[in-house]
Each structure stands twice: as C-alpha cells, then as structure tokens.
Amino acid sequence: MFFWGDSTFILLIAVLILSFIVQHSVKSRYKKNAKIKNNSNLTGAEAARIILDSNGLDYVNIELVKGELTDHYDPRKEVVRLSPHNYNESSISAITIAAHECGHALQHADNYAPLNIRAMVLPVANIGSKGAFPLFLAGLFFSIPILMDVGIVLFAGALLFHLVTLPVEFNASSRAYIQLRDADIATDDEMKGARSVLNAAAMTYVATALMALVQLMRLVLLRSRR
C-alpha cells in the first residue's frame, strides 16, 4: 500500500478488483431479490420473530435501525436490528437478511466458539485497524523499528479478527438457510434467491480477509527492507 514494484503489489491489485466485483455482486443480487415479494407475505421483522420464537429465543428483541444494509445482531443487548427495507418489506432479500441476523442470535444462544473468539479479539482489532498504520509509518519515517514492529503486531490482530469472522458469517448463513427452509418461510424457488444473496454476502468477508492478509504481507516485506 505504501510502495510500488514489490512482489505483493499484483496481489493487492487482484484483491482490490475482487472486492469491487464482490460488492457489485452483493448489491445486484440484493436489489434483484428485494423486488420479489415472498409467497409467505412475511416482512423481514415477522420472519425474524418466527425464527427466534421457534428456537426458544423469544427474549431477543427486533428493532429498526437506520441506513441501508446496516442489519446486525447485538449480542450485548440481545437484539436483532434490521434496516428499514428488511424490517418492513416482504421481499426475498428482507427475509433472507433477517434470517442471517437471527443466525447470529442462534450462535450466541449456542455459545458458538468462533463467535466468542471474535468478541474477544474485537478490542485488539479496533486498536489495530486505527493505530497500526500510523505507528508503522511513524517507525518507517523516523527509523524507529520498534514502532514498525508494534504496528505489524496490531495489524495482525485485525487480520485475526477478519479470519475468525469467516466461520462466524458462513455458519450464520447456513443457519439462516436451514431456518428459512424448515420453518416454511420460503418456497424452494425462493430458497434459490436466498442462497444467492447469502453466498454473495459471505464473499465480502472473504475479500476483506484477503485484503487484510495482503496488506500485512506488504508491511512485513517493507519492515524486512529496513
């Protein structure tokens, strides 16, 4: 990211292109299925309530959150938060995203190990994502190797977070698919659309992890030259 012509530069460009393609794919598949009304005529919030209640999670609340695709599960407050379209609309995309977030609630209830690990790594990842590059650059420009090393360690923590996120997100998508099918929320044809949305969304996490990996490789390579 900071220099040209090294052996990782081509990898960086490739991952950037992959990220662009993945983001486009997610938006395209989401928008396509957001226009298709599901046969059950359930909104995302209603589908989420069915999934949570059928799994004994009636204590988990469902709330509306501002923004587009800002959907998430808050394990601290045990709340599934859905963006306006996914909360209010009866589309395939709405019930799919809602089911995915419920998948995280199910993970939390099951004490799913990767989810717990990600929660433990999160504070380090937050520090690493904000402080790694400034420290590394300071060490690079002022010739202070220890700062470069600390920057690399912090960024490695951020990479670990992205890596642990992969099984968490893939598992949540798997749970979502099962819940949509077993609760008869989606038909067989609708399940195809749901799978396409879930697969595209999962790939965004793969692209993010690859980007972090390549960036760490570049930091290590630059450090080795000093």
Image (cartoon, rainbow, N blue to C red):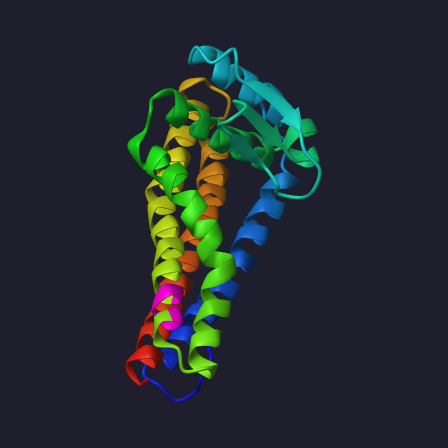
Is 31 situated above or below 183? below
- The kind of secondary structure the magenta stretch mainly shows is helix
Among the 4 quarters of the image, the one containing residue 34: top right
Horizontal and vertical percent position of residue 125: 43, 51
Q: Nearer the viewer, residue 66 or 91?
A: 66
Q: Which residues are magenta?
A: 147-151
**Residue pushed farthest bottom?**
5
Q: Residue at x 56, y 26 (%)?
A: 80
Among the 4 quarters of the image, the one containing residue 144: bottom left
Horizontal and vertical percent position of residue 165: 38, 45
Among the 4 quarters of the image, the one containing residue 170: top left
Q: Is residue 132 magenta?
A: no
Quadrant holding the C terminus: bottom left
Q: Residue at x 53, y 30 (%)?
A: 74
Residue 42 appears in the rendering: no
Is 11 situated above or below 197? below
Residue 97 appears in the rendering: yes
